Image: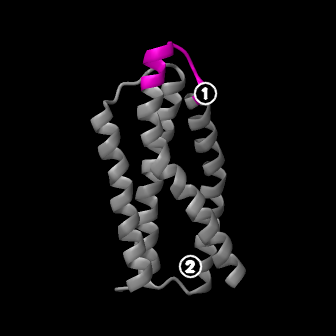
Amino acid sequence: MDWVKIIHLLCVMGWMTSIFAVPRALIYWRREWDRIGEFGPLGDLTVRLYRFSAGLAVIALGTGLWLGWFWGWPVWVHVKLALVALLAAHYLWTGHLVLRARKGQFGESDTYLRVFNEISVIGTIAILWVVVVKPF
């Protein structure tokens, strides 16, 4: 079971990198688009990072469910899964923003993307608190 935990943590770390980095990269991608008027290297990097982390997210979710099953679904695992579902929704919305950006549609302001980015940090802190403290 330790190997499942290791794989879970490794994939979560990779997924979280994208959750934190892609909204910030969208800010810089928009600036690059305004400067050169086309899909440039920063856009390519952002799309690749999002796409790569999607696979890590699937593995992280799968191993997390396996661990929840192994532990007998204590209440804290249910709370963690609810918070992870919210973070996954955030990630899917980020994917929507990336798809629009590929078409040159940058509708959100820098401020919106910065706040959007910080929401994921708060969600991650909540998940870590539940996992470490196990309050339920």
> Which residue is pictured at 56% across the width and 29% down the height?
43
Q: Which residue is mark 2?
A: 68
Q: Decide which of 56, 114 is in the foreground and name it.
A: 114
Q: Is residue 126 left or right of residue 15?
A: left
Q: Is residue 2 left or right of residue 38?
A: right
Q: Amino acid at mark 2?
A: Gly
Quarter of the rendering containing residue 51:
top right
> Which residue is pictured at 51% across the width and 57% down the height?
16
Q: Residues within 10 Å of mark 2 (few under 14, many from 20)?
A: some
Q: CA distance from mark 1 to mark 2?
A: 40 Å
Asked if residue 83 shows in the view, the reply is yes
Q: Which residue is mark 1?
A: 41
Note whether 23 is above or below 33 in the view shown.
Answer: below
Q: Decide which of 11, 35 is in the foreground and name it.
A: 35
- Figure coloring: one colour
Note whether 111 is above or below 41 in the view shown.
Answer: below
| Farthest-out residue, top | 37
Q: Position of residue 100 (x, y in %)?
A: 48, 26
Does the segment drawn in magenta span residue 38?
Answer: yes
